[in-house]
Amino acid sequence: MQTLAHWDGGPGPWILFFPLIWAAVVIGVVTLLRRTVGRGRRGPWRAMADPRPSGDSPIAVLGRRFASGEIDEDEYWRRLSVLDEQFGPAAKGGAA
């Protein structure tokens, strides 16, 4: 009984598929590792998806002052409307 390795006296052209299969496996593993390991870090796609204002923005400072009790609610909304006119609604991070 002949096996595939000794078909017609030689390995045949199908033997060329083994390196292609191994290359596909290696590329798949590398791609999978790069996608899963990179999720823990903050990439450029996450910076765009995070609508919260940065720590040093005027709106963030205003929010911290309101949260700590330095200013009351009326003062917060008055100053927020001024900042909204200056920086636009996108600076609030979508908060209404």
Image: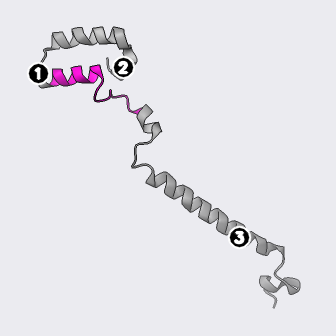
Residue drawn where x is 50% and y is 52% of the image: 35
Q: Mark 2 and 1 residues: CB-CB less than 8 Å, in contact?
A: no
Which amino acid type corresponds to the residue marked 3 in the rendered image?
A: Pro
Tell me if 56 is positioned left or right of 43 in this view. Answer: left
62 part of magenta stretch: yes
Q: Earlier in the sequence, mark 2 or mark 1?
A: 1
Circles 3 and 1: CB atoms closer than 8 Å: no
Q: What kind of element bears circle 3?
A: helix
Is residue 24 depicted above or below 73 in this figure? below
Determine crowd level at label 2: few under 14, some 14-19, many 20+ residues with C-alpha closer than 10 A: some
Q: Where in the figure is residue 41, as x and y percent of width and height?
A: 40, 47
Gap between marks 2 and 1 measured at Cα: 22 Å
Q: Residue furthest front?
A: 56
Compared to 64, does 74 lie above or below? above
Type of amino acid at the residue the image marks with label 1: Gly
Residue 91 is marked as: 2
Label annotation for residue 19:
3
Give the answer, above or below, for where 33 lies relative to 91: below
Residue 32 rendering spot, x and y as whole percentages: 53, 57
Quadrant of res 60: top left
Q: Secondary structure at mark 1?
A: loop
Residue under label 1, please give it.
Answer: 69
Q: Position of residue 93 (x, y in %)?
A: 36, 23
Q: Cα distance, mark 3 to mark 1?
A: 67 Å
- Residue sitting at 41 percent across and 35 percent down? 47
Quarter holding the N terminus is bottom right
Secondary element under disc 2, as helix, strand or loop, is helix
Q: Earlier in the sequence, mark 2 or mark 3?
A: 3
The span picked out in magenta is 49-67
| Residue type marked 2 | Ala
